[in-house]
């Protein structure tokens, strides 16, 4: 790690601009919470019954990192849900983690034209989420899944704790509906122990409201550039021991690029019942129907000089990604004295209709269950919190491929049956040596199976079976310096079993690919003061067998294992009240608020036989998001924002072809009357800058390699929201 200390310090100085190098040691990763209007009380939530939750009863973790707010008495209301905690409780729980985590409340992304996962996670440092087309996004946390040019790998996505990824780890973004969530939890790397430590990416959990914290009625209408139009409505309520929440949205977009139009209908519902004050059960239903055209990657010249042009073959063969999904689940929570037990089951039916180089017709039938117990009590005069859990996620995939003839099915090329299995057992113990200092040790064990049966093939597919046994221990320390300031450190192991999409072709079979493992060292701090919030983490990861692009055919990256690689970086954010009391001098003054998130990435091969110490392709060394908002206690706010990639990054392992730096700027104005109405007007990329938002990667590129996804041009969006 010593060879990059200078680079890490220099990167931190880049954020501080005119400040000394270490003056920014107080910067946050859960920055989105600063978007709550500091001059007005946040919407109150029902108080948690005393003694009802041992995992948070005596926690001294900082409150959600929001701008300062005036105190307000909580009105009487229904008891909160046990199966789905509100934002405040979720923040208290996640901040018992001795590592980089964040809770992003809905106040951070529902105040604007949130269309994709990028709009939800844009101000969480360490998360690189950049649009490709439609809802599709390149998501990488700490460099996870960079070799996955299509779909997602390396980060587990969940909806109310129910997997969005398929059982073999593959994932998509089209099922994410930013209008539907109360908050989003981000667990980086092995900090996602409860969901199974998965590479460096960790887990992201999207949590919907319940009838116990939802409005009786809410609706919104959004519209703007490139034919974007979306409508949404939801309702929730409590009837005695029962509560319900239902939300649905429909959207359409023509797209900035040719051949990038899409439509979607998404819906979620949950029904809870409190059998007793200590026992609650909740049923979940989620359904999605998405139709999306794919414009495809183009050359660098085309991306920068003709950014709206689609790849010719994508238009000729009408490339698409269409998904229909239904999820059902049940989750129950029982409180027993000092112990909470959570358990549940789920089933997912997904149909992927995907005309690309061939016409992919895949049916995924995934199912599983989970049980988790948290015991929080005093032992020998010291607080002790013990967590143990088991996750099961298995499935069957009927994978059929056909010739793609202009977007229609031609002759069948293959028929496969794939059976992924995953069994994860984990345990963690936090012992409080002092009331403010906890020593934490844990471990997670994954047994994964990937089995493929070939029913018919003209593609050279091979039957086979591979199993993986991965142990991931972890030790850490968490110090609550005061009720609003934490310092943490940990050493953790993580592991990722390959998906069926790795390998490709006869040269590398999926069952010959090894699991990717990593050892990560991490230190950081998070907290808040009346006029500042911060969340700062520094990490270094040594990786074995990273799933990487080592050779190519037909212009596509074919994944196998690298030998040794290294990922390290800085994740820094800051919420800062620069000026206040300009026009309103009271306990709730107006103010100018800076919201900033900066990520430094240093990803490299480590003395590789082919690539030496070259940089890993696919992610920028520096990424900065910032906004400066004037906030008035009457409910309106406005100001500029920027997205800055000051240095190009490579798109191939040979380090011969790179992107270009860019700087985007925009403006946003919002209004919320604090009761029923809110509205926004937002301009993005107002200079109409042609830039490369994200790329695919390859081993060796040429100047004409089609790897680049142009970003959207100038766009203006507006929306109106009404709630009872």
Image (cartoon, rainbow, N blue to C red):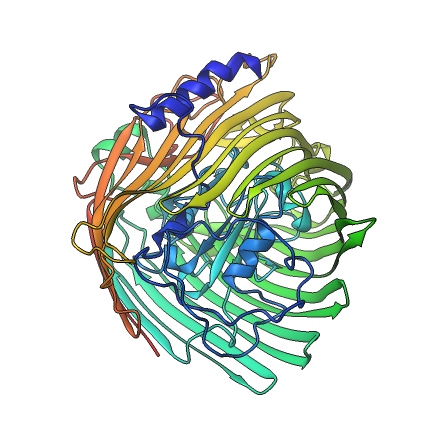
Residue depicted at 71% across the width and 75% down the height:
279
Q: Nearer the viewer, residue 597 or 346?
A: 597
Residue depicted at 69% across the width and 70% down the height:
332
Residue depicted at 76% across the width and 63% down the height:
338
Q: Nearer the viewer, residue 61 or 287?
A: 61
Q: Nearer the viewer, residue 262 or 427?
A: 427
| Quadrant, the C terminus | bottom left
| Quadrant, the N terminus | top right
Q: Residue furthest bottom?
A: 240
Q: Is 177 rendered above or below residue 520?
A: below
Residue 224 screen position, x and y as percent: 22, 59
Q: Is 4 rendered above or below residue 374?
A: above
- Determine which quarter of the picture holds residue 49: bottom right
137 displayed left or right of 640: right
532 displayed left or right of 697: left
Residue 627 screen position, x and y as percent: 28, 43
């Amino acid at each position: 790690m010593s060879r990059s200390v200078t680079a890490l310090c220099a990167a931190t100085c880049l954020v501080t601009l005119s400040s000394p190098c270490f003056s920014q040691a107080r910067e946050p990763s859960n920055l989105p919470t600063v978007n709550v209007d500091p001059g007005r009380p946040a919407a109150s939530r029902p108080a948690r019954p005393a003694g009802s939750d041992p995992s948070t009863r005596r926690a001294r973790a900082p409150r959600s990192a929001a701008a300062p707010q005036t105190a307000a008495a909580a009105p009487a209301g229904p008891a909160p849900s046990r199966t789905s905690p509100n934002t405040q409780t979720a923040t208290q729980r996640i901040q018992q983690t001795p590592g980089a985590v964040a809770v992003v409340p809905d106040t951070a992304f529902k105040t604007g034209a949130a269309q994709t996962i990028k709009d939800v996670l844009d101000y969480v440092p360490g998360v690189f989420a950049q649009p490709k087309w439609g809802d599709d996004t390149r998501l990488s946390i700490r460099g996870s899944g960079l070799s996955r040019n299509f779909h997602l790998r390396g980060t587990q996505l969940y909806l109310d704790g129910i997997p969005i990824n398929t059982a073999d780890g593959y994932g998509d973004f089209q099922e994410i509906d930013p209008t539907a969530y109360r908050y989003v939890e981000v667990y980086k790397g092995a900090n996602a122990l409860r969901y199974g430590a998965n590479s460096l990416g960790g887990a992201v959990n999207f949590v919907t409201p319940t009838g116990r914290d939802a409005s009786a009625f809410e609706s919104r209408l959004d519209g703007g550039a490139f034919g974007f139009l979306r409508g949404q409505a939801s309702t929730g309520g409590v009837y005695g021991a029962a509560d319900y929440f239902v939300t649905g949205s429909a959207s359409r977009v023509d797209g900035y690029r040719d051949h990038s139009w899409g439509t979607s209908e998404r819906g979620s519902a949950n029904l809870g019942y409190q059998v007793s004050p200590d026992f609650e059960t909740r049923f979940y239903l989620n359904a999605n129907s998405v139709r999306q055209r794919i414009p495809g990657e183009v050359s660098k010249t085309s991306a920068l000089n003709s950014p709206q042009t689609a790849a010719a073959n994508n238009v000729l063969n009408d490339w698409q990604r269409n998904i229909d999904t239904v999820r059902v689940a049940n989750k129950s929570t029982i409180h027993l004295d000092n112990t909470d037990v959570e358990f549940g089951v789920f089933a997912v039916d997904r149909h992927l209709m995907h005309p690309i180089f061939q016409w992919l017709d895949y049916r995924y039938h995934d199912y599983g269950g989970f049980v988790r117990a948290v015991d929080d009590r005093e032992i020998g005069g010291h607080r002790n919190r013990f967590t143990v859990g088991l996750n099961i996620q298995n499935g069957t995939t009927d994978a059929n491929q056909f010739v793609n003839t202009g977007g229609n099915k031609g002759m069948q090329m293959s028929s496969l049956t794939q059976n992924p299995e995953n069994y994860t057992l984990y345990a963690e113990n936090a012992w409080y040596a002092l009331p403010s200092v906890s020593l934490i040790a844990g471990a997670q064990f994954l047994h994964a199976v990937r089995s493929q049966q070939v029913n018919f093939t003209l593609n050279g597919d091979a039957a086979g079976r591979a199993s993986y046994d991965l142990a991931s221990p972890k030790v850490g320390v968490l110090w609550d310096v005061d009720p609003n300031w934490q310092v943490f450190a940990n050493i953790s192991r993580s592991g990722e079993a390959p998906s069926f999409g790795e390998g490709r072709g006869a040269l590398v079979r999926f069952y010959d690919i090894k699991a990717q493992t990593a050892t990560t060292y991490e230190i950081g701090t998070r907290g808040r003061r009346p006029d500042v919030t911060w969340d700062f983490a520094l990490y270094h990861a040594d990786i074995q067998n990273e799933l990487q692009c080592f050779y190519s055919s037909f212009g596509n990256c074919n994944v196998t294992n690298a030998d040794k690689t290294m990922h390290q970086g800085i994740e820094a954010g800051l919420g800062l009240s620069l000026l206040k009391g300009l026009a309103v001098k009271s306990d709730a003054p107006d103010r100018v608020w800076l919201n900033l998130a900066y990520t430094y990435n240093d990803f490299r091969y480590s003395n590789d036989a082919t690539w030496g110490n070259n940089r890993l392709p696919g992610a920028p060394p520096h990424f900065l998001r910032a906004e400066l908002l004037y906030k008035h206690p009457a409910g309106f706010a406005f100001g500029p924002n920027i997205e800055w990639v000051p240095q190009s990054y490579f798109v191939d392992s040979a380090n011969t072809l790179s992107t270009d730096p860019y700087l985007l700027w925009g403006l946003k104005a919002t209004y919320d009357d604090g009761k029923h109405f809110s509205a926004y007007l937002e301009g993005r990329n107002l200079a109409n800058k042609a830039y490369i938002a994200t790329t695919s990667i390859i081993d060796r590129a040429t100047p004409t390699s089609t790897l680049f996804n142009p970003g959207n041009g100038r766009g203006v969006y507006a929306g109106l929201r009404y709630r009872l």
